């Protein structure tokens, strides 16, 4: 039977300019193009937070384009 690894790392919720969310370890530098959203905690806590706040999965550029087309 395989051993389950306990993940005791701390994560942060991050997002990019397209308002797409992910999680990243707090002890590592953020990758280019990503910024901290503010939430930190366990992996499960961060993913649960994303489930609540990320209600529209479309990239920001697509949402803007669709709004412009609807207004025209």
Image (cartoon, grey):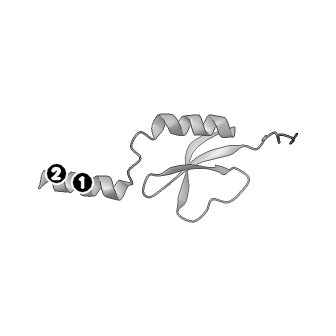
Lateral position of residue 28 relative to residue 50, left or right: right
Disc 2 element: helix
Where 48 falls versus 62 (above or below)? above
Label 1 neighbour load within 10 Å: few <14, some 14-19, many 20+:
few
Q: Quadrant of the C terminus?
A: bottom left
Residue 36, position in %: x, y?
57, 50
* Residue furthest front in the image: 1
Q: Residue furthest bottom?
A: 32
Quickly name the residue at label 2: 70
Residue 7, relative to residue 14: is it above or below? above
Residue at (74% x, 53% y) in the render: 27
Question: In the rendering, at what x and y percent does residue 63 appear?
Answer: 30, 52
Give the quadrant of the N terminus: top right
Please state which of residues 19 and 36 is positioned toward the viewer in this rendering: 19
Can you identify the residue that label 1 sits on?
Answer: 66
Q: Quadrant of residue 45?
A: top right
Q: Choose between 7 and 37: the one closer to the eye.
A: 7
Q: Are marks 2 and 1 in contact (CB under 8 Å)?
A: yes
Instruction: Estimate the spatial distance between the alpha carbons at disc 2 and disc 1, rounded to whole Å.
Output: 6 Å
Residue at (44, 58) in percent of width and height: 17
Helix, strand or loop at disc 1? helix
Horizontal side of residue 17 vs 6, given as left or right = left
In-image side of 18 versus 5 (left or right): left
The picture quadrant where one finds residue 42 is top right
Q: Quadrant of residue 48?
A: top right
On residue 31, the disc is none
Residue 52, position as x, y percentages in the image: 49, 34
**Residue 55 at x, y = what percent?**
41, 39
The residue at 19%/56% (across/down) is 68
Q: Residues within 10 Å of mark 2 (few under 14, many from 20)?
A: few
Number of numbered discs visible in the structure rendering: 2
């Amino acid at each position: 039977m395989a051993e389950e690894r306990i993940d005791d790392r701390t994560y942060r919720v991050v997002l990019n300019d397209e308002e797409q969310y992910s999680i990243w370890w707090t002890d590592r530098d953020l990758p280019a193009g990503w910024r901290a959203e503010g939430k930190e905690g366990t992996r499960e806590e961060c993913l649960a937070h994303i489930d609540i706040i990320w209600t529209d999965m479309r990239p920001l550029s697509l949402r803007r384009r669709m709004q412009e087309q609807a207004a025209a």
